[in-house]
Amino acid sequence: MSEKIKGKSFWKDVQRHLLSGVSFMIPMVVAGGIIYAISILGATTTDKGLVPNGPIMTYLSVLGKAGLSMMIPVFSAYIAYSVAAKPGLAPGFILGFVANNAVAVFGTETQVKSGFLGALVLGLLAGYVAKWMKGWKVGKTLRTIMPILVIPTLTTLICGFAYYFVFATPCAWIMDGLTNLMNNLQGAGKYALAVAIGIFGELDYGGPVTKAVSMFTLSLINEGNYFPNGLFRIICAVPPIAIFVSTIIAKNKWSASDRDLAKSIAIIGCLGITEGVIPFAAKDLKRVVPSMICGCIAGCLVGAFGNVGCPVPHGGFIVLPVVTNPGWYALAIVVGALVGGIVLSLLKPPLSDEDEKASEEYNVLA
């Protein structure tokens, strides 16, 4: 019985650490996402994406991208900080930065970016390793430099090598296998391809799976095939809008702060910025991810029926002027968001007083 209690206590602590990381990440998501969304209003559509008009908008784009790129390191760092306090902070930032950037894996030609899932794992790992080191019995001289030199350095090295050899290599295999699967599905029919893109396209919100699908669709743009990229760009917008839909139709299942945040991510989601979903996914992976997959599949199937296509590496409603069959493209986003929001509302239990209190306690926007 005591083992069960210890197990429950451990997972409760893990949830608390994740909520802490999410609370510090949320302002980065909102500030970065909104500023970047402003920068692409009226942007010029090119084969390399949306190019902001003028130096001011270009500078706003840099500011917005900085916020969006920093949110994953901040997430990882404050998970580690929640576990181990100050000694966990530096390893968390460094490892979160690594998780959010492509790393060439030894023995393969694939570059791995593990995204928020990698940052989540690394943040917890760095925190617990740093906490373990804090318990070492060392001499008085060494004790003074432990929190500023020994623990951050050793924790970063231990967890960094663990990431490279244990985590990144399997991610590279997943990316290669998924790319091969997508290539094989091209000949199986557009609906089979639509389902596959719907399942995998936003599975990890910028991680190795999403990156593999993105690389596949972008490679086909160069061959003049815009259909797979059209499907992928639909689902860039589906998850954040679906979260907003769920907060509208199932208010009793969301905290006030979550409902407020959902309004912000819906706005940037309409402009093709998916990252706003990450705080919600980090809090409730087992419900958010399956629900978003259902929504993405529905959106892709509608897009496949309408033979949509997108010639640029950006999504959401903002690229409507350049997509093939824009009416079907817009309908696909709406249908996908409604399906995802409804499924999430059905899966999510009513919010308890304890959950409401925990959410408000760790949400810095409250």
Image (cartoon, grey):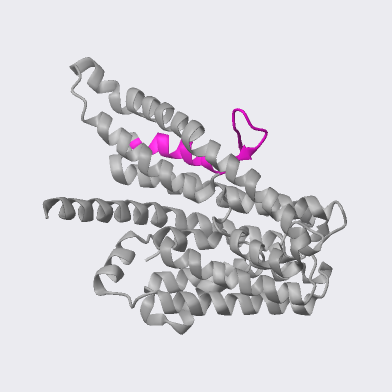
Residue 142 appears left or right of 330: left
- Quadrant in the rendering for residue 199: bottom right
Give the magenta range.
88-113
Q: Quadrant of the C terminus?
A: bottom left
- Which residue is rendered at x = 25% and y = 17% of the image? 142
Q: Position of residue 252 (x, y in %)?
A: 36, 81
- Taking depth in this image into account, of 313 and 195 the one nearest to the observer is 195
Please tell me whether residue 261 is drawn above or below residue 79 in the rendered image.
below
Please tell me whether residue 125 is drawn above or below residue 283 in the rendered image.
above
Residue 64 appears left or right of 288: right
Does residue 111 show up magenta in the picture?
Answer: yes
- Quadrant in the rendering for residue 38: bottom right
- Which residue is rendered at x = 43% and y = 67% of the image? 287
Q: Position of residue 273 (x, y in %)?
A: 62, 61
Q: Position of residue 285 (x, y in %)?
A: 43, 61
- Quadrant in the rendering for residue 225: bottom right
Please tell me whether residue 150 is drawn above or below residue 354 in the rendered image.
above
Q: Position of residue 190 (x, y in %)?
A: 75, 67
Look at the image and tell me whether residue 288 can be seen. yes
Q: Quadrant of the N terminus?
A: bottom left
- Which residue is rendered at x = 53% and y = 40% of the image? 170
- Taking depth in this image into account, of 102 and 52 the one nearest to the observer is 102
